[in-house]
């Protein structure tokens, strides 16, 4: 209930701006599937300790939210909004000496507040090319813990670096503008935190064999960094302005 109230308070000013008759404001919604891409350091990570092999793989996730655009001039605009981001991961473990193979799936959820400057070039009557960059504040909901799908003795705990973190954001896309039906947008965005966002601590303990059982606060514990980098395919729709 508390989270719902906080999110609602953040949304109210955006909704008021979006419903304003000021022609400089546009209010819209966006959906951004998350794409894993090794080229942007958002691919698989692997590690080996003792006889244990681990592979941490980002999975497909999504970002969903709203956006407010303010036209500064015929060439530049500013954008802000609120997004709910759900990142999915899979951690695999292997140890041939004890015939162990398993995986654990977990999610990292955060609220994103982007602030960016957008420039656009008109290429035809209703089509525009857009490019933007800026920074986002990301509030991570909580630390998480998950267990193996086949073996309850295998589990992992993921700890956020900080509750509130920031990231570089950049975007490239194209939009189709109409007066009657609004604006339709398709593009790509890069989200790149300035530092690693979290750490995943794998653990195993079946009473006979154990690994990293002192995590996450013990000495010489093993962990895998989660960079938080990701690429998204962006779908946006801006509502037509009131007359």
Image (cartoon, helix red, strand yellow):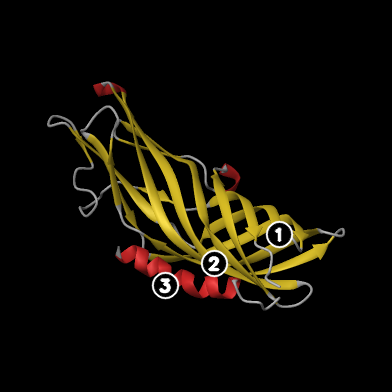
Q: Is residue 227 visible?
A: no
Which percent across, then down, holds residue 43?
Answer: 52, 42
Near-viewer residue (224 or 155):
155
Q: Earlier in the sequence, mark 1 or mark 3?
A: 3
Q: Is residue 8 left or right of residue 205?
A: right
Which percent across, then down, holds residue 92?
Answer: 37, 33
User: Where's the N terminus, which quadrant?
Assistant: bottom left
* Other residues around mark 3 within 10 Å, as few (<14) / some (14–19) / many (≥20): few
Near-viewer residue (96 or 144):
144
Report how far apart the C-alphas of labels 2 and 1 lie in the structure. Answer: 17 Å
At 69% across and 55% down in the image, what residue appears? 185
**The disc label shown at residue 9, or none:** 3
**The disc label shown at residue 81, or none:** 2
Q: Quadrant of residue 26?
A: bottom right
Q: Secondary structure at mark 1?
A: strand
Q: Secondary structure at mark 3?
A: helix
Q: Is residue 179 visible?
A: yes
Q: Is residue 124 left or right of residue 150?
A: right
Q: Which residue is mark 1?
A: 183
């Amino acid at each position: 209930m508390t989270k719902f109230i906080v999110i609602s308070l953040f949304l109210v000013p955006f909704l008021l701006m979006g419903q304003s008759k000021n022609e400089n404001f546009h209010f819209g919604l966006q959906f951004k599937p998350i794409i894993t891409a090794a080229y942007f350091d958002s691919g698989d990570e692997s590690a080996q300790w003792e006889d244990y092999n681990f592979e941490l793989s980002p999975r497909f996730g999504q970002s969903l939210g709203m956006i407010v655009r303010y036209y500064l001039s015929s060439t530049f605009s500013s954008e802000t909004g609120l997004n709910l981001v759900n990142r999915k991961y899979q951690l695999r473990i292997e140890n041939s000496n004890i015939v162990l193979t398993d995986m654990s799936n977990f999610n990292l959820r955060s609220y994103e507040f982007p602030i960016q400057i957008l420039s656009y070039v008109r290429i035809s009557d209703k089509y525009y090319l857009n490019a933007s960059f800026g920074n986002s504040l990301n509030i991570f909901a909580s630390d998480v813990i998950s267990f193996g799908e086949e073996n309850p003795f295998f589990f992992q705990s993921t700890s956020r670096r900080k509750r509130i973190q920031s990231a570089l954001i950049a975007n490239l896309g194209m939009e189709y503008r109409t007066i009657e039906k609004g604006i339709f947008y398709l593009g790509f965005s890069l989200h790149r935190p300035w530092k690693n966002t979290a750490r995943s601590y794998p653990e195993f303990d079946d009473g006979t064999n154990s690994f990293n059982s002192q995590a996450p606060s013990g000495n010489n514990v093993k962990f895998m960094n989660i960079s938080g980098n990701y690429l998204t395919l962006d779908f946006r729709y801006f509502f037509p302005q009131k007359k």
